[in-house]
Amino acid sequence: MDFDLSTEQHGRAERVRTLVRDRLRGTPPRDPDSPLTRDEWGVLAEAGLTGACLPASVGGGGLGALDTALLLEAAGSACSHGGPPFAAAAHLLACGVPMRDFGRGEAVGDLLRGMASGALLAGNAATEDEAGSDVNAMAATAERDGQDYVLDGTKAFVSNAAEADVFVAYAVTDPSAGFLGTSAFAVPRGTPGITVGPPLRKAGLHACGAARVTFAGCRVPAALRLGAEGQGGAVFQFSMGWERACLPAIYLGAMEDQLDQVVAHVRGRRQFGRRISEFQAVSHRVADMRRRLEGARLLLYRACWLLDEGRPEAAAAAALSKVSVTEAAVANGLDAVQLHGASGYLVETGAEERLRDALAGTLASGTSEIQREIIARGEGL
């Protein structure tokens, strides 16, 4: 069992880290209403994040889950804001992956080329206000009409909605079929009948603009359906497997950067005539931050490896790693604020922003409670 990364893996990650640090780090805190700019998106595309695991035939990197996660981790450590790498991960994993594996034909191929290059930005339109974690309760419908489907319904919390050029949307095509009654579609933004609402004001991840998206009599060619009719549930679960395994890697990177800043602070800060790092209450808290980070990293790498190997236990492993990484990010965020003292509550230190960004991790891509249900089912419960 080899725990070391290859020279090639180190090199790819360092290239992303350098580019993102030089171009995106240190930008001032942004307003919750400010989505990712196209210039910022261009940096992520130049770093290869917009097409990392998309096929080389469409201009992607052709990488597997582990190598994709390593790039997201590098971006998470180099960017002082969590929004940009989160936006790239949502675009790539929740949208690019299902289009890659279930899309057919020239129209989907053209969309994938644009997504891989960064010319097109994608948003995942799955969640609904009332359905929430119960994806089988979605109310959006898609009725077949000749060579088209007519989509009607409103989606909530659509990441990248404000700037998205294409949406991956899920809708009910057969209300009587349950899990087999949902279908998935790639819907270009210019399709008549799409309305994007105002940006939702979130606690964190500000550069990743989210909004509600309404489809009203929206005609989508059958050629843009992903998978067979009724396969939408399977498409969604497949994409969630990738998202749950890879996306939390941005929090691994953020925790590494956060820990570096905490160590520098406690070494330099003096109270009662001593560096505060000399107090056991401080040093042990730092030790716990490192323990959480390293344990979470091993679980995430293993989940991605299992996904790359096509192993059946990959879904449970992804759930285990996701809940571990994201809850570690929240716990480490709280510790970082506490160890900075009053300055940790100030925007200028960045400690409070890392914490706010971390809060979304336990909610997105399936809440921690959903992940525990998956883990429990894996134990036969």
Image (cartoon, helix red, strand yellow):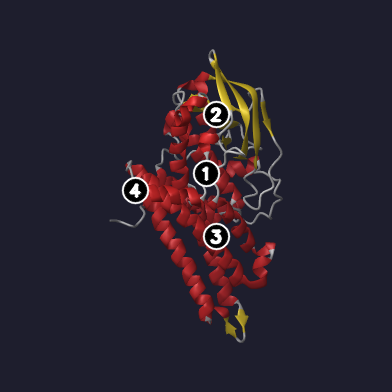
Residue indicated by mark 1: 89
What crowding class fits label 2: few (fewer than 14 Cα within 10 Å), some (14-19), or many (20 or more)?
many
- Label 1 – label 3 distance at C-alpha: 19 Å
Tell which tag, 3 or 2, sits nearer the viewer.
2
Tell which tag, 4 or 2, sits nearer the viewer.
4
- Label 3 – label 2 distance at C-alpha: 33 Å
Amino acid under disc 1: Ala
The residue at the point 55 percent across, 48 percent down is: 85
What crowding class fits label 4: few (fewer than 14 Cα within 10 Å), some (14-19), or many (20 or more)?
few
Residue indicated by mark 2: 171
| Residue 11 in sight here | no
Q: Secondary structure at mark 3?
A: helix
Q: Please count the marks in the image.
A: 4
Q: Secondary structure at mark 4?
A: loop
Residue indicated by mark 3: 330
Amino acid under disc 2: Ala
Cβ atoms at labels 2 and 1 below 8 Å apart? no
- Label 4 – label 1 distance at C-alpha: 31 Å
The label on residue 380 is 4
Tell which tag, 4 or 1, sits nearer the viewer.
4
Tell which tag, 4 or 3, sits nearer the viewer.
4
The residue at the point 33 percent across, 57 percent down is: 3
What crowding class fits label 1: few (fewer than 14 Cα within 10 Å), some (14-19), or many (20 or more)?
many
Expressed as whole percent of the image width and height from the top left, the position of residue 189 reads 62, 28
Q: Secondary structure at mark 2?
A: strand
Tell which tag, 1 or 3, sits nearer the viewer.
3
Q: Earlier in the sequence, mark 1 or mark 3?
A: 1
Expressed as whole percent of the image width and height from the top left, the position of residue 260 reads 53, 66
Q: Earlier in the sequence, mark 3 or mark 2?
A: 2
Q: Earlier in the sequence, mark 2 or mark 1?
A: 1
